[in-house]
């Protein structure tokens, strides 16, 4: 069971050991629109190339509360951006664990804009309707990072959000010119298609 998994090193979630003890608390509102056949996060579906976006400041403890959703659930959520996050409340459990939160030691390769690195798995189940999962992490890696359901067709129909971390640093950055060639299809779109 997920609640029995704990890291061997660096236990302890960032922030104060209480619900809402983070610098920023994001309660996601997950829903499904039967008219459009799209999932929504905070009322907006992810529809490429645009996405709902939540801006988060740098070097803050972020707490995200993700509710269980009846449609297609439970949902395995995945966070990009090389954030090691702590599961301070697991699905199926009403208590919080800030001192020794759930963590996994099985390494896998995660990719950043810099290089592949080894880290713990970063997928968590949202649980069933009426349930929720709470995760925490520190915003220490500027960029637009994707938080999404890891069931591909759920992602395709909108169950995702972008966390824009440290927008000021991103705006001031000067990416390599090679990045201009990464998205030729997107770059060729007419502004009315964006």
Image (cartoon, rainbow, N blue to C red):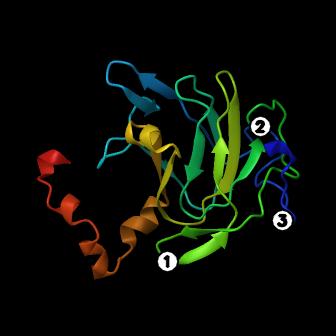
Residue 131 is labelled as none
- The answer to whether the residues at label 3 and label 2 have Cβ atoms under 8 Å apart is no
Report crowding for label 2: few under 14, some 14 to 19, many 20 or more residues within 10 A (C-alpha). some
Towards the viewer: 46 or 43: 46
| Sequence order check, earlier mark of 3 and 1 | 3
Q: At 38% from the left edge and 71% from the top edge, which residue is drawn?
A: 172
Label 2 to label 1: alpha-carbon separation: 34 Å
Residue 169 picture quarter: bottom left
Q: At 36% from the left edge and 45% from the top edge, which residue is drawn?
A: 51
Q: Quadrant of the image for the N terminus?
A: top right
| Sequence order check, earlier mark of 2 and 1 | 2
- Answer left or right for 103 relative to 39: right
SS assignment at label 2: loop
SS assignment at label 3: loop
- Answer left or right for 101 relative to 23: right
* Residue 155 image position (x, y, % from top left): 44, 42
Query: Taking 99 as reference, is 33 above or below it?
Result: above
Towards the viewer: 103 or 192: 103
Query: Taking 78 as reference, is 66 above or below it?
Result: above
Report crowding for label 3: few under 14, some 14 to 19, many 20 or more residues within 10 A (C-alpha). few
Q: Label 3: which residue?
A: 10
Q: Which of marks 3 and 2 is in front?
A: 3
* Residue 57 image position (x, y, % from top left): 54, 55
Q: Label 1: which residue?
A: 114
Q: Which of marks 2 and 1 is in front?
A: 1
Query: Taking 188 as reference, is 65 above or below it?
Result: above
Report crowding for label 1: few under 14, some 14 to 19, many 20 or more residues within 10 A (C-alpha). few
* Residue 170 image position (x, y, % from top left): 42, 66
Towards the viewer: 104 or 101: 104
Label 3 to label 2: alpha-carbon separation: 20 Å
Q: Label 2: which residue?
A: 19
């Amino acid at each position: 069971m997920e609640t029995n998994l704990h890291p061997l090193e660096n236990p302890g979630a960032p922030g104060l050991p209480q619900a809402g003890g983070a610098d920023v608390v994001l309660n996601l509102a997950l829903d499904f629109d039967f008219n459009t056949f799209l999932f929504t996060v905070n009322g907006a579906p992810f529809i490429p190339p645009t996405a709902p976006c939540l801006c988060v400041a740098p070097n803050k403890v972020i707490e995200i509360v993700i509710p269980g959703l009846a449609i297609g659930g439970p949902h395995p959520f995945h966070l990009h951006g090389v954030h090691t996050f702590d599961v301070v409340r697991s699905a199926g459990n009403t208590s919080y664990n800030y001192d020794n939160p759930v963590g996994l030691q099985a390494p896998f390769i995660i990719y950043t804009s810099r290089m592949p690195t080894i880290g713990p798995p970063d997928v968590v189940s949202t649980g069933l309707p009426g349930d929720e999962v709470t995760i925490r992490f520190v915003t220490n890696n500027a960029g637009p990072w994707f938080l999404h359901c890891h069931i591909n067709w759920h992602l395709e129909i909108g169950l995702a959000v972008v966390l824009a971390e440290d927008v000021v640093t991103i705006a001031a950055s000067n990416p390599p010119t090679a990045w201009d060639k990464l998205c030729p299809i997107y770059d060729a779109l007419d502004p009315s298609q964006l």
